[in-house]
Amino acid sequence: MKAVIPAAGLGTRLLPATKAQPKEMLPVYDKPTIQYVIEEALKSGIDDIVVVTGRNKRSIEDHFDKSYELEYTLQKSGKDRVLKQVRKITDLADICYVRQRDLNGLGDAILSAEKHINDDAFAVLLGDSITKGPLCTRGLLDVYERYGKSTISIREVPNPCVDRYGIVSGS
Ligand code: UTP
């Protein structure tokens, strides 16, 4: 199973925090949001990951890439625990990156990964959204495996928020 993680958006709702840094890199406690997202994919049994990036998103690639200078400095100063944490990030998964050229929304971001996915089934995890409790992606995969149909996870939001999110309405 493959995962597509769109992370190319401008994050205008979180300005000015997102002016020069991707919202997917904003930390929750001690990790950037997108690291939680990738860890969720891995824990759910997905290890082939495509991240959709865009302009000003280099720090996402840097975060999951090896940092020789940092590792050397940590090693030299005997900071073994942090060194282990830093190396773990690089070893997390095989991640490849595709670029969304024009920001035409979420659907278009997913379409940017088309060549990598071919006709395979795939999961989409949003690069800026994390969930608590049981693994949401694992739950979606279980439903997909049972019924062989596309599944989507949604969350109830209070009325004043309806113009801030993509909304699914129904009875
Ligand atoms: P959002 O709609 O929350 O992201 O999309 P956004 O466009 O950055 O948000 P605002 O409205 O400007 O604040 C959910 C995920 O889809 C990605 C975003 O990066 C985010 O992780 N996305 C969104 C893309 O990859 N490309 C797009 O064109 C839009």
Image (cartoon, rainbow, N blue to C red):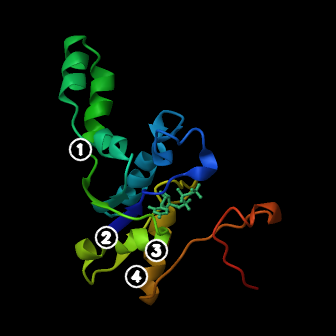
Specify which label sits upstream in the sequence, 3 or 2: 3
Disc 2 marks which residue?
113
Residue 88 position within the rendered picture, expressed as x and y whole percent measured from the top left: 28, 38
Residue 131 position within the rendered picture, expressed as x and y whole percent measured from the top left: 56, 56
Residue at image location 37% in from the left, 75% down from the top: 111
Disc 3 marks which residue?
107
Give the quadrant of the C terminus: bottom right
- Dot in front, 1 or 4: 1
- Dot in front, 4 or 3: 3
Residue at image location 41% in from the left, 46% down from the top: 35
Packing grade of label 1 (10 A; few <14, some 14-19, many >=20) is few
Q: What is the three-letter code of the residue carrying label 1?
A: Asp
CB atoms of marks 2 and 1 within 8 Å = no
Within 8 Å of ligand 1, the CB of disc 3?
Answer: no
Specify which label sits upstream in the sequence, 2 or 1: 1
Q: What label does residue 116 carry, if any?
A: none
Disc 4 marks which residue?
145
The single residue placed furthest to the right in the displayed view is 159
Mark 3 element type: helix
Q: What label does residue 91 carry, if any?
A: 1
